[in-house]
Structures are given as C-alpha cells and as structure tokens.
Image: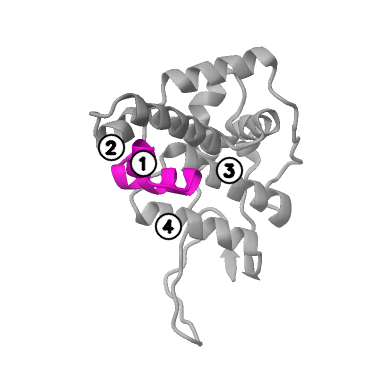
Amino acid sequence: MFELYAGGYCIDHASWDGVAGEVISVQFPALQVNRLLHAQGRGFELPIKHELFDSRIADLTLLLWDEARQGGPRGRLYGDGISLALLGLLIEEHGACTRPEVRSRARLATAQMALIRDYIDEHLCADLSVEHLAALVGISAAHFSRSFKASFGVSPHAYVTERRLCIASRLLQQDKFMSLAEVATGVGFSSQSHFTESFRRKMGVTPGRWRLG
C-alpha cells in the first residue's frame, strides 16, 4: 500500500495499527523532476491520496530502494530509468500532472542513433546518465528514454550494460594478464563483484571461467 502527498505537505506524527513492517519514503525534488521531464515537469504535482495499491509502483520503489541501499552500483542510467518509470506511472495512473501529457513514441533518427551509439562506446567507463544522452540529441530525458527503447529495443541502461559486457568478454580473452578488477573498471562497472554478477547473469559463467574458455 502506498500514499501520495502534495508538495509542502508535512506529517508531524503517525501511528500504525497492525503487524510491524517498514516504510519507504520517496521524495520528488522539483529540480530533479524538471530536469528529467523538462516542460512536462512544470506540470507535475502530486495529489493527496490515501491507501493506494499498484504493484508496479511497489516494484519500482523496491528496486530504487535496493539500488540506494547498495550505494548505487548500477550507476545513474539505472536510477534515472527507474525514476522515469515511476514518474510516468504517477502521471498516467495517479493524476500527478496538472496538464495533459503529450507522449511521443517516435524512434530516434538514424543519425541520432549513430551519434548515441558512438558516444556510448567512447564513454563506456563514464557514469552515463539519461539526461546527458538526451541532451546530445536535444530532447527531454523522458522523451529520450521512450524513443531509445523504441529504436534499440531495450532501455538505455540495458544497452550500455550489454556493450560493457561485450567489450569485457573480448578483453578477457585477448589479454590474459589483465586482472578482473581492471577489466571491470575499464568498461565502466562500479566494482569487480558487480561485474562478475552481471557477466554471469548474461553469459551463464563467471568472467574467470569465460577466460579459460
């Protein structure tokens, strides 16, 4: 169950009559909302609603909390993607917008796709963000996220992870003296453990086993 509270709403105390549990509080700073949604963000306004149920909201919130709890190992692209999905659901399903949303599912132009593809390959080790990639083609982060998926078939975070794993798999077999930590850092993973987890999930084996052939 979740509740929505408008900007400036303050709770000075609360009580819960039931089984003990945990509460996750998610705040939406106006600056961040405007940064991700651009013009649409100026119309973003949470209504006050109580005792709402939406498994999608719950799942996204738990993913965001888990990422924050671990210190953000998956990077800004992952956090941006979840935040945009959460904002989108609040706008579409729970009236968190004072103006109608104009949604665009248009694909990126061929030149834009090439620009984004080249930029990602050249900056794999950077902590990329949806906002920065969107700025390269001159559109909002929300529009970019939808257009990217329509064009590439996956989210920006999933695409970047795929590219990192692809390059890493080559490095592992081409340079036997490069440590796993160096490979992980070289392609943009936050740690060797995160690299190993992602590699095993994608390839079915650990990086060390892959290197052995």
Crowding near the residue tagged with mark 2, few <14, some 14–19, many ≥20 C-alpha atoms within 10 Å: many
Residue at the spot of label 1:
207
Residue at the spot of label 2:
180
**2 and 1 marks in contact (CB < 8 Å):** yes
Q: Nearer the viewer, mark 3 or mark 1?
A: 1
Q: Nearer the viewer, mark 3 or mark 2?
A: 2
- Closer-to-camera residue (213/51): 213
Q: Nearer the viewer, mark 4 or mark 1?
A: 1
Crowding near the residue tagged with mark 1, few <14, some 14–19, many ≥20 C-alpha atoms within 10 Å: many
Residue at the spot of label 3:
84
The verdict on residue 97 being magenta is: no
Looking at the picture, how far across and down is residue 95, in whole percent? 71, 53
From the viewer's perspective, tell me whether residue 167 is left or right of residue 114.
left
**Main SS of residues in magenta:** helix
Q: Residue at x 52, y 37 (%)?
A: 157
Looking at the picture, how far across and down is residue 33, in whole percent? 54, 40
Magenta segment: 190-213
Whether 71 is drawn above or below 142: the answer is: below
Looking at the image, is mark 4 or mark 1 earlier in the sequence? 4
- Element under disc 2: helix
> CA–CA distance between discs 2 and 4?
25 Å
Q: Amino acid at mark 3?
A: Leu
The numbered dot on residue 51 is: none
The numbered dot on residue 66 is: 4
Looking at the picture, how far across and down is residue 169, in whole percent? 41, 32
> CA–CA distance between discs 4 and 1?
24 Å
Q: Residue at x 48, y 86 (%)?
A: 19
Looking at the picture, how far across and down is residue 213, in whole percent? 39, 37
> CA–CA distance between discs 3 and 1?
32 Å
Q: Residue at x 63, y 59 (%)?
A: 56
